[in-house]
Amino acid sequence: MPSVELPSGVPLEWSHRVAPLARGSNYVVINGMEVYQPREFKATTMLIGDPTSPVALCTSWADPWEVIDGETIDRFSILAPLRTPGGIEVMLANLARHPSIHQVLIWAGGKFDNTPKATLPRDYLFRLFKDGINGMCKIIGTDFTLNESLLSDGGIDVIRKIISSVQVIGP
């Protein structure tokens, strides 16, 4: 694995838990767990705790290392912020890849978490898990449409299964 440039605030001992900035594909193995992390997304915002944990942590605007510590990181499998509606697609891809994740805990308590830019993706996420998606890939009750490539080859059924089997808990 290429060396990892750690963002400010990430403990050095967590270097194996952060995705490398330089990577050749949209999939990367972090701490023994293969995750989907598109190359165009900032890689170093995703952490991997215990790959066997059934709980993922989704921070709103804050970076995950700002809200957890060495004693709590392994309570979660994947830890990542949700800063844009496009992050919902990354979350769905990782939930599809790791069906052992049954809960996504949403944390929102940072100084930017109640701004319109930060609440929009959370609102879309909660709508997705409450109301679902229509046949045109749109999250019902929103103006956000998921990338159609997620829904091809039976993907819409996978997403509907995720919606019915994963509990999203948060503010």
Image (cartoon, rainbow, N blue to C red):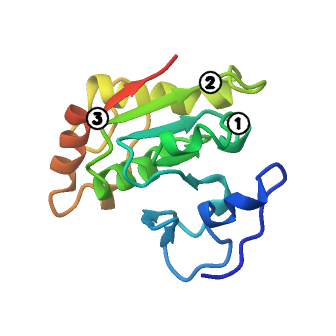
Residue shown at the point (68%, 39%) measured from the top left:
69
Q: Amino acid at mark 3?
A: Val
Residue 59 image position (x, y, % from top left) = 59, 35
Q: Is residue 6 above or below residue 96?
A: below
Evaluate whether residue 169 shows in this view: yes
Residue 171 image position (x, y, % from top left) = 52, 16
- Image side of residue 8 versus residue 14, left or right: right
Q: Which residue is mark 3?
A: 166
Q: Which mark is residue 119?
A: none
Return the disc, 1 or 3, that comes first in the chain's sequence.
Answer: 1
- Image side of residue 163 versus residue 113, left or right: left
Q: In this orientation, which residue lies closer to the viewer: 141 or 169?
A: 169
Residue 108 image position (x, y, % from top left) = 62, 24
Q: Can you tell which quarter of the image residue 53 is in? A: top left
Q: Sort mark 1 into few (<14), some (14-19) or many (20+) by Cα contacts within 10 Å.
A: many
Looking at the image, the residue that sits furthest to the right is 8
CA–CA distance in space, label 1 to label 3: 23 Å
Q: Sort mark 2 into few (<14), some (14-19) or many (20+) by Cα contacts within 10 Å.
A: many
Return the disc, 2 or 1, that comes first in the chain's sequence.
Answer: 1
Q: Amino acid at mark 2?
A: Ala
Q: Can you tell which quarter of the image residue 159 is in? A: top left
Return the disc, 2 or 3, that comes first in the chain's sequence.
Answer: 2
Q: In this orientation, which residue lies closer to the viewer: 110 or 151?
A: 110
Q: Are marks 2 and 3 in contact (CB under 8 Å)?
A: no
Q: Which mark is residue 62?
A: 1
Q: Which of the image's four quarters has the N terminus?
A: bottom right
Residue shown at the point (46%, 30%) measured from the top left:
105
Element type where label 3 sits in the image = loop
Looking at the image, the residue that sits furthest to the top is 171
Q: Which mark is residue 108?
A: 2
